[in-house]
Image: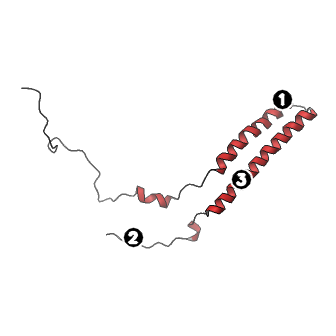
Amino acid sequence: MKHQAYQPILITDASRSQPDQLHSRQVRYVVMMSIRIVCIVAGAVLVGVKAPLLWLWLPLCAVGMVLVPWLAVLLANDRPPKDQHRLARFRQRNLDDAPPRSLTAQERPHPVIDAEP
């Protein structure tokens, strides 16, 4: 058996705790939904005062009202990617092992019967 050398885990390599990740995602969600509220209020104010270039501002507010909540939900449910060292054991292969190969015609368990008489 091969023994791996002991490699200490550095505190800088540690991932963030789950409560910390959850808190940062909640803050991001609240900020993005606040932007949506600003877009709704701005759209209502622009319509109420009949602002110039209303044809330009209302679609921008509408995009903010529709696109921002969608992005907020996606980003709030997003978790950081898994660490590479956790997946490394699945990718590493022993170099001494030969890759699987197919059997040759002579190694097959049953010989092929020729159809010719």
Mark positioned earlier in the residue sequence (1 or 2) = 2
The answer to whether 3 appears left or right of 100 in the picture is right
Residue that numbered label 1 is attached to: 55
For numbered disc 3, what is the local secondary structure?
helix
Residue that numbered label 3 is attached to: 28
Viewer-nearest residue: 21 or 56: 21
Residue that numbered label 2 is attached to: 4
Furthest toward the left, the residue is 117
Furthest toward the right, the residue is 49
Report how far apart the C-alphas of labels 3 and 2 lie in the structure: 41 Å
**Position of 59 relative to 26 (above/below):** above
Report how far apart the C-alphas of labels 3 and 1 lie in the structure: 30 Å
* Percent position of residue 15, x then y: 58, 63
Number of residues whose C-alpha sits closer than 10 Å to that of mark 1, classed few (under 14), some (14–19) or many (20 or more): few
For numbered disc 1, what is the local secondary structure?
helix
Report how far apart the C-alphas of labels 1 and 2 lie in the structure: 67 Å
Quarter-of-image position of residue 52? top right
Number of residues whose C-alpha sits closer than 10 Å to that of mark 3, classed few (under 14), some (14–19) or many (20 or more): some
Quarter-of-image position of residue 96? bottom left
Quarter of the picture containing the N terminus is bottom left
Q: Nearer the viewer, mark 3 or mark 1?
A: 3
* Percent position of residue 7, x then y: 47, 72
Q: Residue at x 29, y 51 (%)?
A: 99
For numbered disc 2, what is the local secondary structure?
loop
